[in-house]
Image (cartoon, coloured by chain):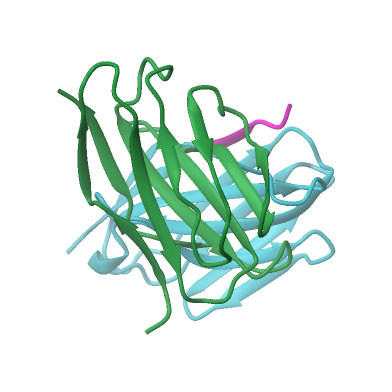
Chain colours: A cyan, B green
Amino acid sequence: KQEVTQIPAALSVPEGENLVLNCSFTDSAIYNLQWFRQDPGKGLTSLLLIQSSQREQTSGRLNASLDKSSGRSTLYIAASQPGDSATYLCAVSDTNAGKSTFGDGTTLTVKP
Amino acid sequence: DGGITQSPKYLFRKEGQNVTLSCEQNLNHDAMYWYRQDPGQGLRLIYYSQIVNDFQKGDIAEGYSVSREKKESFPLTVTSAQKNPTAFYLCASSMGRDQPQHFGDGTRLSIL
């Protein structure tokens, strides 16, 4: 059974700092990996989707990498801003279409 | 604007009562999903549907039921058999397994 772990559970940084969030998974037979952002009491917003054949994806200040063989993904946030404060979740989709397994998330606080 | 609408935002259930959560999308997506989120945790898959009139159990389907009679609608019924229904329920949709999942704003269900 796929297990997804996100470390750390919480992270606090000063504004302007570059940071990395980590996601690890136990079964490397994945179809894709997706990073989401969740604001308190809200649904999830998709940030980046990496297909299993890809190594990384970039969108603005965000860069996500995928190392399938080691079961790891990282989300790099450059020049963090207070508006980046949220919970970030990663989800891996297995080869059986439609089934995704989520990590518990990393709650990020960016202090002005 | 295209999107996913979940209603109601808050719902209360009495003992022995079935309740139905609504999820409607106008994105013309084929696949739809229901997730449950407990405090401080990630999402767990309840049911998913890849096409109209077809759906599959996720990891925690016991005590829940769904239907998919129309492409745009995927209602979730929380039955009296679900003994711990208090949670945040999220509906999502996607064009297919290669595409990102889009989420609604969720329904928070509580026990009276």
Image position, residue A18 (x, y; %): 43, 64
Residue B38 seen anywhere in this rendered image of the structure? yes
Quarter occupied by the C terminus of chain A: bottom left
Q: Quadrant of residue B84?
A: top left
Please report the residue visible at 47 percent of the width from the left and 36 percent of the height from the top.
A104
Task: Examine the rendered structure and indicate whether residue B52 appears above or below residue A9.
Answer: below
Along the viewing direction, whichever of B43 and B48 lies nearer the viewer: B48
Is A26 left, or right, of B17 in this rendering?
Answer: right
Task: Examine the rendered structure and indicate whether residue B85 appears above or below residue A104.
Answer: above
Task: Examine the rendered structure and indicate whether residue B67 appears above or below residue A66.
Answer: above
Please report the residue visible at 36 percent of the width from the left and 45 percent of the height from the top.
B21
Task: Examine the rendered structure and indicate whether residue B33 appears above or below residue A2.
Answer: below
Image position, residue A56 (x, y; %): 70, 68
Which residue is outermost to the bottom?
Answer: B1
Please report the residue visible at 58 percent of the width from the left and 66 percent of the height from the top.
B71
Residue A8 seen anywhere in this rendered image of the structure? no
Q: Which residues are magenta?
A: A1-6
Which residue is outermost to the front?
Answer: B69
Please report the residue visible at 20 percent of the width from the left and 22 percent of the height from the top.
B14
Asked whether A19 falls inside the magenta stretch, the response is no
Labels in figure, total: 0
Along the viewing direction, whichever of B31 and A31 lies nearer the viewer: B31
Q: Quadrant of residue B4?
A: bottom left
Image position, residue B86 (x, y; %): 29, 27
Quarter occupied by the N terminus of chain A: top right
Is A61 left, or right, of A40 in this rendering?
Answer: right
Image position, residue A89 (x, y; %): 48, 49
Is A109 left, or right, of A51 in this rendering?
Answer: left
